Image (tube, helix red, strand yellow):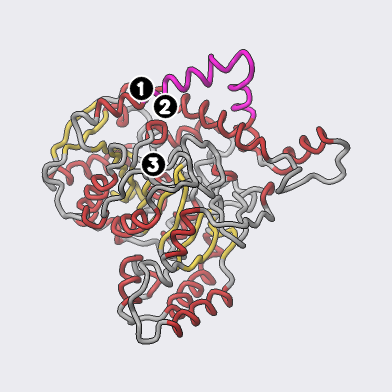
Amino acid sequence: MSLRKLTLFELKDKFTKGEVSAAEIVKAYFQRITVVESKVKAYITPAKKDALLKEADDLDYKLRGWRKIAPLMAMPIAVKDNICTEGVKTTCGSRMLENFVPSYDATVVSRLREQGYFLIGKTNLDEFAMGSSTENSAFGPTRNPWNLACIPGGSSGGSAAAVAADLCAAALGSDTGGSIRQPAACCGVVGLKPTYGRVSRYGLVAFASSLDQIGPITKDVRDAALMLQLIAGHDPLDSTSADVPVPDYQKALKFTMRGMKVGVPLEFFAEGLDPEVELAVRTAIIKMQELKAEIREISLPMTTYAVATYYLIATAEASSNLARYDGVKYGYRAAKEKGLLETYMKTRQEGFGPEVKRRIMLGTYALSAGYYDAYYGKAQSVRTLIKRDFDEAFKDVDMIVTPTMPTPAFKLGEKVQDPLQMYLSDIYTISVNLAGVPAIVLPCGFSSGKLPIGLQIIGRPFEEEKIIRAAYAYEQATDWHKKRPTL
């Protein structure tokens, strides 16, 4: 089997046993990138081949006859381009940061570096992670490896497409309202959004600080468990980082769901859900029952208000976070400005794309005098009610199973002119961020158009091991994760 088709765990095992060299791994992936990247366009900044090959050759020389190595040594991993990488451009998919080169690594990148990873490239995303299709990038859209005419999901579309197209062994993404899980579903791979605070946000360029979370996108559940193990944990550099123990996620990998109570929320199977998606998800639920899970119908009544709540809170926080891009301290600066105010206005007018401007205006309005209590304040109150829904549900069940998207991946350009329809693509994922709970997505079927369909499993706060166990048991009982696009 070609090296680039192996899972991260399989490739790691071969390298650890000395069956393959670091140089061979790097060459295999660059060969794939040469052939496929021009079609998929997953990367904004791919690694420099000669530099990475030299790094691989040096590593092979250093390891001669010695195979006790770090877990990710020589593993080619991609990083979403809103996560800081020292000495490597971090653009956020925006002209505003087109030439920004961080002087430090994000904590998650530092942890990968400690484990010996190879940065294979920085992946494309919707500008500042604002989008559901990776069409909002200033550097052009990424395409779905299963159908190049379709979106890969967003905003971590580049990371998901890179994993699905075998352009990396695994990737990091960020998830503010579904931005790991939704592209994972679109591209037929695994995406894990950890509990808020489980993984450090230090070095993640902020979109909405109370919602953002970094997580892995991988080829299977075992790889996701490995990646989460290595990036999770308390970080004093992040004031929102939770100081709680990190369990051994590999021990959660079991072939049964015996004793697990699974909730199926009525509100997630209502009007607007594509019949093919519903069939695939309900079939997956039946499979879970065969794996000895106990299935219970539940209700999450505040789901109706999730989209409105999210797009008030997220845009308000975006307005605040993006105020720092003013053409003075760093990033893009408009030329030929006349005075400070004009510098601000022209820089932001020229540096931000349409979707980012839209969200800044929505958020600024929601925070403005006279409207704060009516919009942002009320949204925060409803957020509390949404979290309370989950708290009540988790008194009776161990996890909740839902669709990930209302439809399979749609065509590029199909919803660009209709922001509301685009926002509704995240209807099944945003509640998870509002409640701060973990969720994992994995493939559970295909549409008649041969596009992947994703199953979402939601867990209690800091109980990632339970959803990993459920996902792994389901995955091993099916073959969906073994299917790969032909490019």
Residue 80: x and y, percent? 51, 54
Residue 373 in magenta stretch: yes
What residue is shown at x 58% (from left), y 44% (from top)? 128
Kindly tell me whether residue 395 is visible in this rendering: yes
> Residue 18, how many percent across, how many down?
33, 81
Horizontal arrangement in the rendering, residue 75 relative to residue 100 (left or right): left
Going by the numbered disc 2, the residue's amino acid type is Ala
Q: Disc 1 residue type?
A: Met
Q: Please identify, in this view, whether the residue under mark 3 or under mark 1 is nearer the observer.
A: 3
Distance from the alpha carbon under mark 3 to that under mark 2: 25 Å
Q: Amino acid at mark 3?
A: Ala
Give x and y (percent) for residue 320: 61, 32
Q: Which mark is residue 242?
A: 3
Q: Disc 3 on helix, strand or loop?
A: loop
Badge 1 is on which residue?
302
Residue 284, image quadrant: top left
Magenta part of the protein: which range?
A: 361-386
Placement of 48 over or under 352, stated as above or below: below
